[in-house]
Amino acid sequence: MRSVMRFFFVWALACLVFCAETALAASPRETLEVSLNQILDIIKSPAYANPAERDGLRKKIGQYVRASFDFQEFSARTVGAGWRNFSPQQKSAFADAFADLLINTYVNKIDGYNGEQIAFIGERLSPKGDRTEIQTVISQKNGKKIPVNYRMLPKGGTWKVYDVLIENISLVKNYRTQFQDLLRTTDPDQLIVRLREKASEVQKSDGKK
């Protein structure tokens, strides 16, 4: 679980330090930048420091995260071969629960920003042009540099994130190991219940920090 927390701490840092070059989200990089800057605008807003307004603003951040990720694709890749055993209703419920868990984890980590800087270093487009990987590096205050890559695909006329790699470790693969272990002893419905419970726990833990 520590590695999962690290994923979202670094993702939060990325959302806080990207700088958009254009308001038109056309290329994968531009699409990612626009989304991240929407979150940055919220964090920079004086209202975000107001406890009375923060819950509403964090819900808006969650909406932006949902718009940036393809959680159906994320879920299918994370569950792996077992995904074909899920009914359409279970797939939808799982994707929603998984999104809630990831978003709640993310918004709990977003306050950890401490002036880190991020830079784009490249982009790898698949031969067919249907997948891309945006490569970035986060420079921390202590001088350490953390590579963070965003894998994206076209969906609904835009580009969506379907995996994040931190120091070459895939978020999809990290969760896949956990879910495959759970599916050996539970069925999809039980896994969905556990995801919902975990998402609720993470959400409630925000007020205890």
Image (cartoon, grey):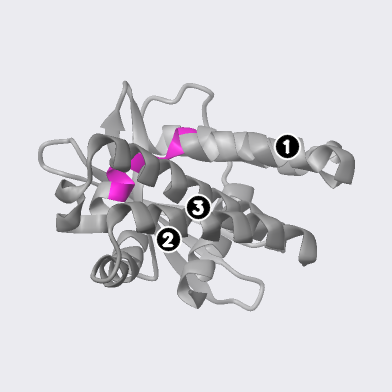
Point out the tag, 2 or 3, that comes first from the N-terminus. 2
- Where residue 14 sits: x, y (%)? 55, 53
Dot 3, crowdedness within 10 Å: few (<14), some or many (≥20)? Answer: many
- Where residue 90 sits: x, y (%)? 31, 42
Q: Where is mark 3, residue-wise?
A: 196
Q: Where is mark 1, residue-wise?
A: 57
Q: Where is mark 2, residue-wise?
A: 148
Q: Secondary structure at mark 2?
A: strand
**Quadrant of res 106:** bottom right
Dot 2, crowdedness within 10 Å: few (<14), some or many (≥20)? Answer: many
Amino acid, disc 2? Val
Q: Is residue 13 above or below residue 75?
A: below
Q: CA distance from mark 2 to mark 3?
A: 28 Å
Magenta span covers which residues? 67-75
Q: Secondary structure at mark 1?
A: helix
Q: Is residue 139 above or below residue 72?
A: below
Front residue of 121 and 51? 51
Q: Nearer the viewer, mark 1 or mark 3?
A: 3
Point out the tag, 2 or 1, that comes first from the N-terminus. 1
Query: Was residue 70 drawn as part of the magenta stretch in this picture?
Result: yes
Amino acid, disc 3? Arg
- Where residue 81 sits: x, y (%)? 14, 56
Q: Residue at x 22, y 40 (%)?
A: 87
- For the question of whether residue 33 can be seen, the reply is no
Front residue of 186 and 182? 186
Q: Nearer the viewer, mark 2 or mark 1?
A: 1
Point out the tag, 1 or 3, that comes first from the N-terminus. 1
